[in-house]
Amino acid sequence: MKKSQNEENDVARWLTYRPEIKVLDCTVRDGGLMNEHNFDDEAVKAVYDACVAGGIDYMELGYKGSKSVFSPTQYGPWKFCSEDDIRRIVGDNDTDVKLSVMADAERTDYHTDIIPKDESPLDLIRVACYIHQIPTALDMVKDAHEKGYETAVNLMAISIIPDRELDKAMELIAASDADIMYLVDSFGALYSEQTRHIIKKYMSYMEPLGKRVGMHAHNNLQLAFSNTIEAIVNGANMLDGSMAGFGRGAGNCNMELLTGFLHNPKYKSRPLYECIHKYIEPLRKDLLWGFDLPYMITGFLNQHPRDAIKFNLSEDRGNIVKFNDMMAEKE
Amino acid sequence: MKKSQNEENDVARWLTYRPEIKVLDCTVRDGGLMNEHNFDDEAVKAVYDACVAGGIDYMELGYKGSKSVFSPTQYGPWKFCSEDDIRRIVGDNDTDVKLSVMADAERTDYHTDIIPKDESPLDLIRVACYIHQIPTALDMVKDAHEKGYETAVNLMAISIIPDRELDKAMELIAASDADIMYLVDSFGALYSEQTRHIIKKYMSYMEPLGKRVGMHAHNNLQLAFSNTIEAIVNGANMLDGSMAGFGRGAGNCNMELLTGFLHNPKYKSRPLYECIHKYIEPLRKDLLWGFDLPYMITGFLNQHPRDAIKFNLSEDRGNIVKFNDMMAEKE
């Protein structure tokens, strides 16, 4: 059978790599949602060192949370990412890894807590918002952009936004100073066809402006990695992953799967494996992230995983029939 | 933004279902590879009852292994699936679930051990073979077909078959009595684009003859479910899954994910959850199937998972750096 041009292109896609693709490690930031950001310095430094040695493009350290919203006695340092805490780990960050923090709309004192870029080792401010927070988010983007940072808007809970609102939101984000617009599948509820559909929309707004589209997936339906691939195939060039998938609930796209897939020779797996073995996997028995059936059920229901997280911390953990019946009653 | 016709079709695909799609539960057969097919009757009956209550289309009970190849003192009854053992569980199988067994090329005394369909509760014989065993496999298909069974060819280790050989194999299988031709990703090594590429080829041979294409995935790269979806989107109508993904190494596509995705109202989740909770999950701590990094590494290397299975049973289990270095040395 003679190969068609399409077939040749297909094969080229999986034997080559796109150098413009960047990966962002969100191990400490998204994983921190499972331990109230209480990592000791050694663990954060280990993730940072692994990112440097592994050729990771960006590392996210945590949130710039407002101390008037979150109590510093309850939450660890990476909920706030003070400049002092950051420098204690990375110094001036004289490496190829760029550093990011997440700034939640309405939960960040951005005017004061985000300082000018030339005074900070940070490179990228990622503004996370729900659809109704777009005006605040865009003001935060403007602020960070004027202070000299790269900026991203991470529009959360994408799977429950009606199309007519999403179109308008994209228009506004594309017209803003944001360099990157992220698809955030907060509930891990998207299938590949839906991912493709949304990423194509994102691309139609951002690509003509030379701006980037990003993907942040959750693994409720075991689709975090494959939806990230789907995003790549449709043009996304900023990809979130975390070591061992460490993140809230069902967790994220595993960074070690992602870099293995990308085939860019600058990515090295062994430093990631070392960090996973020594620092991340030992956390699993207490923090309990990763695919399991309660997370699958909230994913199928297109709901926040909070009920599943609570169930997994209760004495009923493992009794999937009970969780199923509980959720069915609620519907 | 006005919706295009394509967009409407996309949405239709994920809000409707294809009634012609059938699912096959391979929990006992593929899971049996982790315990030498030593299930007690209660467990096999529980899986059968769950399939009946869950609306599953086919259940595979095990292998028709030759007793001159496999010792009945080493292997449990589901390595052999004698007609007596089958009837002890299912009687005459007066249900809507069809029953299948797997018959390995060169490891099955098919002339004697597969009896005429009108004397057996079995419905489907799935012949598993490597590419060099095609002549034997086709003789087995002919034999089973003449005895009155539905037949499938499960061509294993697809990810290491050169295209020129695969084309010829498909031609031969399509021209045979086989009703179904399966993509079997034995090493869990395929990405979505490769899956699409192969399924499209399969379809080009089978669809014009009114024959079916099937998908049997492994989860080494956390892509078993998504590659099964990819197969569905490209026309496959016979889909393997197992409860809790129970199967060799990284396991299979989870049946509960698959039926949740398919949205055919005849599939019921709760009976599957009951069986998983009571019978399948309790096996995990000893049998150790499911995604983890050694299986990921053999997947990336496009190799049989045997080294990873062995490593996971050794005292080094969990030390992914050691496994990585061991495999790197071998390369």
Image: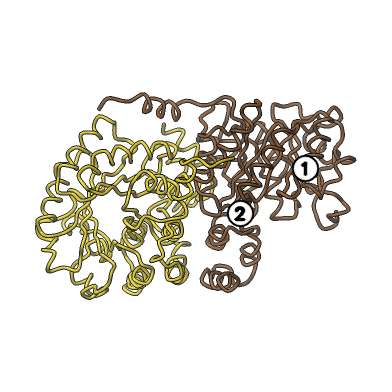
Chain colours: A yellow, B brown
Left or right side of A128 for A228: right
| B217 up-or-down from A17: above or below | above
Q: Which secondary structure lies at badge 1?
A: helix
Q: Nearer the viewer, residue A89 or B151?
A: B151
- Observer-nearest of B51 and A225: A225
Q: Residue at x 24, y 33 (%)?
A: A167
The image quarter containing residue B228 is top right
For residue B321, above or below residue A6: below
From the image, which quarter does the N terminus of chain A lie in?
Answer: top right
* Residue positioned 69% across, 26% down in the render: B96
Q: Position of residue B267 (x, y in %)?
A: 57, 30
Q: Chain of mark 2?
A: B
**Dividing the picture into quarters, in which one does residue A38 lie?**
bottom left
Question: Relative to B260, is A274 above or below?
Answer: below
Q: At label 2, which amino acid type do we have? A: Phe
Mark 1 Cα-neighbour bin, 10 Å: few <14, some 14–19, many ≥20: many
Q: Earlier in the sequence, mark 2 or mark 1?
A: 1
Q: Is residue A116 left or right of residue A292?
A: left
The residue indicated by pointer 1 is: B137
Helix, strand or loop under label 2:
loop
Image x and y of residue B169, in percent: 69, 42
Location of residue A23 (image quadrant) = bottom left
Q: Is residue B258 left or right of residue A302?
A: right
Pointer 1 chain? B
Q: Nearer the viewer, mark 2 or mark 1?
A: 1
Asked whether residue B53 is in view, the answer is: no
Residue placed under numbered mark 2 in the picture: B187
In which quadrant will I find the C terminus of chain A?
A: top left
- Amino acid marked by disc 1: Ala
The image shows a total of numbered marks equal to 2
Residue at the spot 64% in from the left edge and 62% down from the top edge: B309
Residue A35, position as x, y percentages in the image: 35, 61
